[in-house]
Image: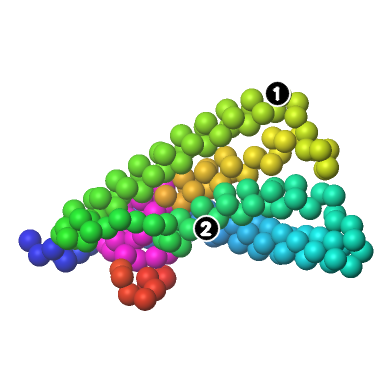
Amino acid sequence: MDKDHHPAPNPALSNGVVSTIAARIDFFIGCFESFVLATAVLLMAANTIANVIGRFVFHSSLFFSEEVNRILIVMITFAGIGYAARHGRHIRMSAIYDALGWRVRKVMMIFITLFSALIMLVLCYFSIQYISKVATSGRILPALQIPVYWIYLWVPVGFFITAVQYLLTALKNLTQKDIYLSVSVLEGYEDSETEV
């Protein structure tokens, strides 16, 4: 069998209710991620600029600036992992994968996305356990006077959203004839992967 043979998708799954629901979930998660990332980056820039102006013009820094940026870095990092999964931009080692035939690559992509989703869910579980321990410690941030565990609330959210992205990608690969790196990105090595 030719390694580039593409079997027809299962018509019961490819354009049905499952695909519509998956597309809506993907759309809403995408809007949420974009909003969180854009807002956090803008707030971090504004906070840093205000702190620099305060330090050099008024000779007084914002007392909460470092803590706010710490919160925003965690937010950007863990919202960003879902965003990268959505756009198929996570680092991948694909020398062996690329040498395989189409059917094996398709099966591997489904396995990889399902396994990645499982790992993200396990990390989500452990991050919730960690946050519970930090919450019971009663520690608060010195400048903002908010509980330390609030900083880490984005960690399980990011892991969960990333798991959902990988599950949606596995579903897309199960129901479509092409191989997808994410719900909207076809496999390929051109300057930019094909967005659908």
* Residue 173 magenta: yes
- Direction bottom: furthest residue: 191
- Direction right: furthest residue: 58
Magenta residues (range):
167-187
**Coordinates of residue 184 in the picture (x, y in percent):** 42, 64
Q: Residue at label 1?
A: 136
Q: Within 10 angstroms of label 1, few (less than 14), some, or many (20 or more) residues?
A: few
Q: Amino acid at mark 1?
A: Thr
Q: Residue at x 39, y 57 (%)?
A: 91
Q: Amino acid at mark 2?
A: Tyr
Q: Quadrant of residue 186?
A: bottom left
Left or right of 164 in this view: 15: left
User: Is 138 drawn above or below residue 163 in the view shown?
Assistant: above
Name the element at disc 2.
helix
Q: Within 10 angstroms of label 2, few (less than 14), some, or many (20 or more) residues?
A: many
Q: Residue at label 2?
A: 83
Q: CA distance from mark 1 to mark 2?
A: 31 Å
**Coordinates of residue 134 in the picture (x, y in percent):** 67, 28
Name the element at disc 1.
helix
Q: Does residue 29 show up?
A: no
Left or right of 113 in this view: 150: right
Question: The N terminus appears in which quarter of the rendering?
Answer: bottom left
Q: Quadrant of residue 128?
A: top right
Closest to the observer: 29 or 62?
62
Closest to the observer: 26 or 59?
59
Q: Does residue 36 show up?
A: yes
- Direction left: furthest residue: 1
Question: The C terminus appears in which quarter of the rendering?
Answer: bottom left
